Image (cartoon, rainbow, N blue to C red):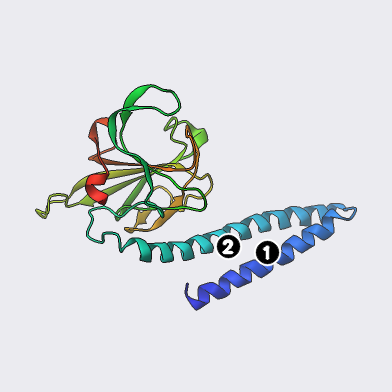
Amino acid sequence: MKADNLQQLEKYQNELENAQEQLLIYQNNDLNEQMKQEMIKLNKRVSELKGYVKAYEMTQTNIFIKQQLVKLDPNAKLYFPASTTRITSYFDNNRKHPITGENKAHIGIDIAMPGNQYIFAAEKGKVIDVYKEYDGKMNGYGDAIMLEHKIDLDGDGQKEVVTTFYAHLMPETTQVKVGDVVDRGQLIAQMGNSGISTGQHLHFEVHIGKWSKQNAVDPMLFIN
């Protein structure tokens, strides 16, 4: 992290500590209306500062992990999308669902590991959708992100549309919004357990063309 970023982070952390101390003073005293309003402002600022500190910490972590992961296979068509390479479930046209017990296609791979794990864009592209568990758009996938890329898959110089999908993200950790352009390996969220899930993991899909179950292909063809 650059020196100016470190100084800004220290400034946020100091302001956060001071605001939390002031809140504690208010909480231990009888409040008049003015103090109540000040307490509301302080609570809002504490929330903002926590977000800033978290963003800086995730950026620093992203830089370190990217340096490690790029050693895996810098020539792969797609960048490995998580800070752990532990794959717990592979692409399978007839997998038994771990929760429902139903046999159905598993059109991606699952990457899982407890603790703080980070999710990266598999290639430079555009954010075409960001989903929240409560919006009901992608039933069962929880918080999720969809990216669209233009990639030369065959090495013939002709680029085609490839869509990547990242699901079961940790709520409130999404670092991008619809319309953003992201770089290969850019931090976009943290691994989570949102949606229908048996534990913390990333469900990662690759589609040749627009997102559809019919267009899904095995991600291992591109990240290995």
Residue assigned mark 1? 16
Occupied quadrant, residue 97: top left
Q: CA distance from mark 1 to mark 2?
A: 9 Å
Number of marks in picture: 2
Asked which secondary structure carries label 2, the reply is helix
Residue lying at the far bottom of the rendered structure: 3
Q: Which mark is residue 53?
A: 2
Tell me if I can see residue 161 in this picture: yes
Q: Answer with left or right where residue 58 lies relative to residue 216.
A: right
Give the residue at x 22% y 46%. Answer: 221
Q: Position of residue 147 (x, y in %)?
A: 33, 47
Q: Residue at x 51, y 45 (%)?
A: 170
Looking at the rendered structure, the secondary structure element under dot 1 is helix
Residue found at x 43% / y 35%: 141
Residue 15 falls left or right of residue 156: right
> Label 2 crowding class (10 Å Cα cut-off): few <14, some 14-19, many 20+?
some
Give the image quarter of residue 210.
Answer: top left
Query: Is residue 212 visible to the viewer in this orientation of the structure?
Result: no
Residue 81 location, x and y as percent? Answer: 36, 51
| Left or right: residue 179 compared with residue 56 | left
Which numbered disc covers residue 81? none
**Measured from the top left, where is residue 164 in percent x and y?**
31, 44
Q: Amino acid at mark 1?
A: Leu
Alpha-carbon neighbours of circle 1 within 10 Å: few (<14), some, or many (≥20)?
many
Give how far across and how far down residue 10 sits, in percent.
61, 72
Sequence-wise, the earlier of marks 1 and 2 is: 1
Q: Residue furthest right?
A: 30
What's the amino acid at mark 2? Answer: Val
Quarter residue 101 falls in: top left
Who is closer to the viewer here, 26 or 144? 144
Q: Nearer the viewer, residue 148 or 139?
A: 139
CB within 8 Å, label 1 to label 2: yes
